[in-house]
Image (spheres, rainbow, N blue to C red):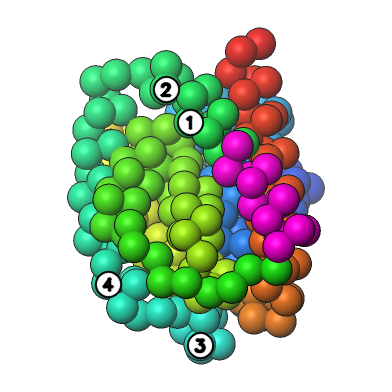
Amino acid sequence: MPDFSTIGFLDILPFIAIGFAAQLVDGALGMAFGVISNTLLLSLGVPPAAASAGVHMVESFTTAASGISHAAHKNVDWRLFSRLVIPGVIGGILGAYVLTQVHADVARPVVLAYLTAIGLYLLWRGIKYPPTDRKPKVIEPLGLVGGFLDAAGGGGWGPVVTSNLLVQGANPRKVIGTVSTAEFFLTVTISATFIATLGLEAVTVATIGLLLGGVMAAPAGAVVAKRVPTKGLLVMVGVILTLTSLYGIYRAIT
């Protein structure tokens, strides 16, 4: 763990900005904190293991703040929450275990290609066909897979779970609030695994900066999710998911 007494405000400011921007998107769209934070941290030279560990530790706090905000704004479907959270935690535990056995980079390009296709579909659906709410039918398996991919692939709970629930026709505002709230329990599980394996080495300047920025942005994201029209949310989800997934594919194959 670094000596924080020697770190100046300018050293930590870029990570605060990254945390704020990533959580604003995640709180409003129900996805992308992990993807955006990991991508930007790696581009700033943070080692992959430290970036992944730091992001998951920060998400334990940002998802708590975001979940409370979404609950206060009545964005959470508690029945959907109860069906997602337990399979998600189980998937997170399994994914954390697999990560110690198999390198996740093998599956990552395939997952990102799938998410790109989902993003393009949601973008098209949002522009051409104003959605009508339907009850999603596939929930528990989705939580299991989303939790597994989030732990094993360094991100995926929001993109996988949120996008698939939206494809099934669920209400975007309720989906975003519910998925963000359930993510708290998932990130705590994954973070405990990282701390057990990496110890305090997982706490870096990037971790503290992401935490400060993310917690500051969490309440604003919930307000955006409540006030932006359904069609606008679908379009934004499609754009963010497509762009971040395409960039991830580019990084994976170059």
Visible in this render: residue 120? yes
Residue indicated by mark 3: 74
Crowding near the residue tagged with mark 4, few <14, some 14–19, many ≥20 C-alpha atoms within 10 Å: few
Where residue 226 appears, as percent x and y from the top left, is: 64, 81
Secondary element at tag 4:
helix
- Contact between marks 3 and 1 (CB within 8 A): the answer is no
Residue at point 53% right, 74% down? 133
Residue nearer the viewer, 129 or 42? 129
User: For residue 7, what is the image quadrant?
Assistant: top right
- As measured in the structure, the alpha-carbon distance from the residue carrying label 3 to the one carrying label 1 is 32 Å
Write down the quadrant of residue 29 in the picture. bottom right
The kind of residue on which mark 3 rests is Lys
Q: Are marks 1 and 2 in contact (CB under 8 Å)?
A: yes
Q: Is residue 184 left or right of residue 166?
A: left
In whole angstroms, how far apart are the C-alphas of marks 1 and 2? 6 Å
Q: Which secondary structure, mark 1?
A: helix
- Residue 82's disc is 4
Between discs 4 and 3, the one toward the N terminus: 3
Query: What residue is shown with label 2?
Result: 107
Which residue bears the numbered disc 1?
111
Name the side, left or right, on which 119 lies relative to 151. right
Q: Residue visible at 66% across and 11% down?
A: 254
Q: Are marks 4 and 3 in contact (CB under 8 Å)?
A: no
